[in-house]
Image: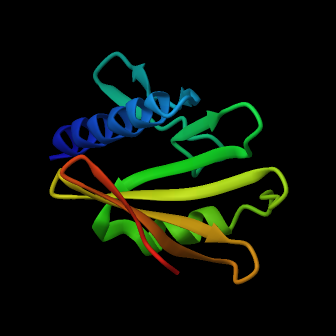
Amino acid sequence: MKDKRRATGMKNELYVQKYLEGDGYVVHRARASLIKTKTSVFCRSNDILECIDILGKRKDRKILWIQVSTGSRKSEKEKKILSQDVWNPKTDEVEIWLCFKGNLWKIYKLDFKENKFVEYKKIERGKTFTINT
């Protein structure tokens, strides 16, 4: 079960990475590290700031910090990101990308004034739509 979730997570992160690279971003993706003991092997998360999977940078744009997850884990991810008191609205864009059944993505952006995430974009079957907020 964990291996399937890990594989799905890696696949989703790769999708977001390729999407951003296609939009001109240079991307850094946090990758889990394998730890081997005498009797077993396990995986340890290497999330940036313990809550970010992908960091994107494009000239003349704010730094893009992204957490990638599945739809059912939105509130958990929001709490984790908001618990970090490091975000600066002048230099940072913080997003949560949620994947639903592989072909629908909902993208939430941190509204710094309200200190909450609002949906502003979705990707459905490869087409990007802006949500009017």
- What colour scheme has been applied to the protein in the rendered image? rainbow
Q: Tell me if residue 71 comes above or below residue 15 in the rendering.
A: below
In the figure, residue 73 lies in which quadrant? bottom left
Task: Name the one closer to the observer, 18 or 51.
Answer: 18
Q: Tell me if residue 85 comes above or below residue 32 in the rendering.
A: below
- Give the percent coordinates (x, y) of residue 33: 46, 25
Name the residue at 49% across, 59% down.
96
- Give the percent coordinates (x, y) of residue 48: 62, 40
Task: Name the one closer to the observer, 6 or 124.
Answer: 124
Q: Tell me if residue 33 comes above or below residue 82 in the rendering.
A: above
In the figure, residue 74 lies in which quadrant? bottom left
How many marks can you see?
0
Quick check: 119 left or right of 106?
A: right
Name the residue at 81% across, 50% down.
91
In the figure, residue 112 lies in which quadrant? bottom right
Name the residue at 62% across, 68% down.
110
Quick check: 62 left or right of 102?
A: right
- Give the percent coordinates (x, y) of residue 104: 23, 58
Task: Name the one closer to the observer, 79 or 37.
Answer: 79
Quick check: 51 left or right of 39?
A: right
Q: Tell me if residue 10 comes above or below residue 70 in the rendering.
A: above
Task: Name the one closer to the observer, 15 or 33.
Answer: 15
Name the residue at 61% across, 36% down.
56
- Give the percent coordinates (x, y) of residue 126: 24, 46
